[in-house]
């Protein structure tokens, strides 16, 4: 598995002919098809090389290189250009492509020769993951056992806790590791586009469908499809998806022929799907199909042993070889004391800010700017920050109801926290009562429906009497 060259294959639709994937595997090449708009930082980090189509213009290459620069990553890029456009070949090389190759179909052995000539080799260290805490190590051991069995897996955990990372580990440790890993966020697009992306369409199925377009299910043949935020999938699509899980067959939009599927499905959610079943926004039969094996990822505050190794990894990734960054013992204690409501994603954001502010190469507490302030009124912000900066451990009750409280500050913190919760509860309740739906209430509050749903869930957990009856 670790000896395969991982290729992130990018074009306008993120497609590779599924029949070619097995041939690539014979050359120890793992192709991961992707559309540039959906590529994440993790996709780049785990790729040994990126192949991008540049047809008629170089904007795709510019956008790709801009993304790499934004992530501060150095991944070799190979541009596929029309063989008769010599000027474009020169332009792509000047822009930063490692090399350019003709866009006509090349055999897998030709690509192996290109990679060998460019000295592109598999780099297993790029796929290093942090599982230092005993809780994380137990989760990793269980995931590796699950990976060897071809069952559908449901990953549950809060936003930013690393569900996609665990999904990739399940894929990499499975017998399907040589096949594609296709990730898709079910909440990222409108329902009609989600259906087209997943199922694809036949030529002439709708206005503008000038050719056959394989969907993501078809592109994942022989590999794994990861469906993030499965709880946001519409009820209509849930029924179609359930049929796919049951029969392992599907039909493209406008198609007349059933297509057999050989894929593994991994789904993820940050919602309580059992609550969604009660609210009739998620199908019970689909839940039991998805949770053939369920893995729960704990929030970062419950696996503090991962925090410092993750910090060191982020610093190494962002600083590169030419900049040495360290952090003080006080900064380390501050990082360990903070409850990380945004989990690993927030930790990464905090470290990026700290590296920008720490001009001398040493990160101290004054460089750590945390994200857990969305419900604080501006007049209270300086008070909360002063508590956090002076004694973060004492200030923990502001962030977490389970944290130990010190008598010197617990009373004013309790009063502030209770006042904030009461004010937010009153505002949200009034908006819900004056609206026909949760979406309309969210619009009145100036927030997204998803944010409102999270706030309602948090208020319920805090004991507030919030009704579950508001439908999307």
Image (cartoon, rainbow, N blue to C red):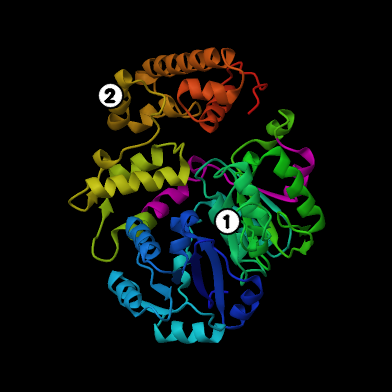
Real-space CA distance between mark 2 and mark 1, rounded to the nearest whole angstrom: 41 Å
Q: Nearer the viewer, residue 375 or 257?
A: 257
Magenta segment main secondary structure: helix
Which residue is at a point 33% across and 72% down the rendered structure image?
Answer: 92
Q: Quadrant of the N terminus?
A: bottom right
Q: Are marks 2 and 1 in contact (CB under 8 Å)?
A: no
Q: Secondary structure at mark 2?
A: helix
Q: Which residue is mark 2?
A: 382
How far across and down, in percent of the image, does residue 113 sit?
47, 87
Q: Which circle's residue, 2 or 1, is located before the other in the chain? A: 1
Q: Secondary structure at mark 1?
A: strand
Which residue is at a point 48% across and 40% down the rendered structure image?
Answer: 301
Q: Nearer the viewer, residue 435 or 148?
A: 435
Q: Is residue 44 visible?
A: yes
| Crowding at mark 1 (Cα within 10 Å: few <14, some 14-19, many 20+) | many
Which residue is at a point 35% across and 77% down the rendered structure image?
Answer: 89
Front disc: 2 or 1: 1
Q: Nearer the viewer, residue 337 or 212?
A: 212
Q: Which residues are magenta?
A: 282-311
Residue most extreme to the right: 247
Residue 294 counted in the magenta span? yes
Q: Which residue is mark 1?
A: 183
How far across and down, in percent of the image, does residue 293 sit?
72, 51
Task: Say whether residue 87 is left or right of residue 105.
Answer: left
């Amino acid at each position: 598995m670790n000896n395969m060259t991982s290729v992130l294959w990018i074009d306008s639709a993120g497609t590779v002919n599924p029949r070619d994937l097995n041939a690539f595997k014979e050359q120890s090449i793992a192709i991961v098809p992707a559309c540039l708009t959906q590529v994440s930082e993790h996709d780049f980090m785990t790729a040994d090389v990126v192949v991008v189509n540049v047809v008629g213009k170089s904007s795709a290459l510019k956008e790709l290189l801009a993304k790499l620069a934004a992530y501060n990553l150095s991944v070799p890029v190979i541009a596929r250009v029309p063989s008769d456009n010599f000027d474009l070949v020169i332009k792509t090389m000047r822009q930063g492509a490692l090399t350019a190759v003709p866009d006509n179909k090349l055999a897998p052995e030709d690509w192996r020769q290109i990679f060998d000539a460019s000295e592109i080799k598999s780099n297993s260290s790029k796929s290093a993951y942090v599982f230092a805490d005993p809780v994380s190590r137990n989760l990793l051991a269980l995931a590796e056992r699950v990976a060897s069995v071809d069952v559908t897996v449901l990953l549950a955990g809060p936003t930013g806790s690393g569900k996609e990372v665990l999904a990739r580990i399940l894929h990499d440790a499975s017998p399907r590791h040589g096949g594609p890993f296709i990730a898709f966020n079910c909440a990222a697009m409108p329902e009609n586009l989600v259906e087209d992306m997943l199922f694809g369409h036949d030529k002439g199925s709708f206005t503008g469908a000038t050719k056959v377009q394989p969907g993501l299910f078809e592109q994942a043949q022989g590999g794994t499809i990861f469906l993030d935020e499965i709880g946001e999938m519409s009820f209509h699509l849930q029924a179609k998806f359930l049929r796919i899980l049951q029969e392992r067959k599907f039909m493209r939009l406008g198609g007349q022929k059933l297509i057999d599927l050989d894929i593994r499905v991994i789904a993820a959610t940050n919602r309580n799907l059992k609550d969604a079943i009660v609210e009739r926004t998620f199908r019970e039969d689909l839940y039991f199909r998805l949770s053939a094996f369920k893995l729960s990822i704990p929030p970062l505050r419950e696996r503090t042993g991962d925090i410092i190794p993750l910090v060191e990894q982020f610093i190494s990734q962002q600083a590169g070889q030419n900049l040495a960054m360290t952090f003080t013992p006080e900064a380390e204690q501050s990082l360990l004391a903070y409850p990380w409501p945004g989990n690993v994603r927030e930790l990464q954001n905090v470290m990026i800010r700290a590296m920008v502010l720490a001009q001398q190469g040493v990160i101290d507490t004054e460089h750590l700017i945390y994200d857990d302030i969305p419900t604080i009124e501006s007049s209270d912000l300086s008070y909360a920050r002063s508590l956090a900066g002076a004694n973060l451990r004492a200030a923990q009750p502001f962030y977490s109801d389970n944290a130990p409280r010190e008598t010197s500050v617990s009373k004013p913190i309790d009063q502030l926290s209770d006042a904030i919760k009461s004010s937010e509860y009153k505002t949200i309740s009034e908006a819900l009562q004056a609206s026909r739906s949760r979406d309309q209430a969210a619009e009145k509050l100036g927030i997204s429906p998803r944010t409102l749903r999270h706030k309602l869930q948090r208020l319920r957990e805090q004991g507030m009497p919030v009704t579950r009856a508001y439908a999307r």
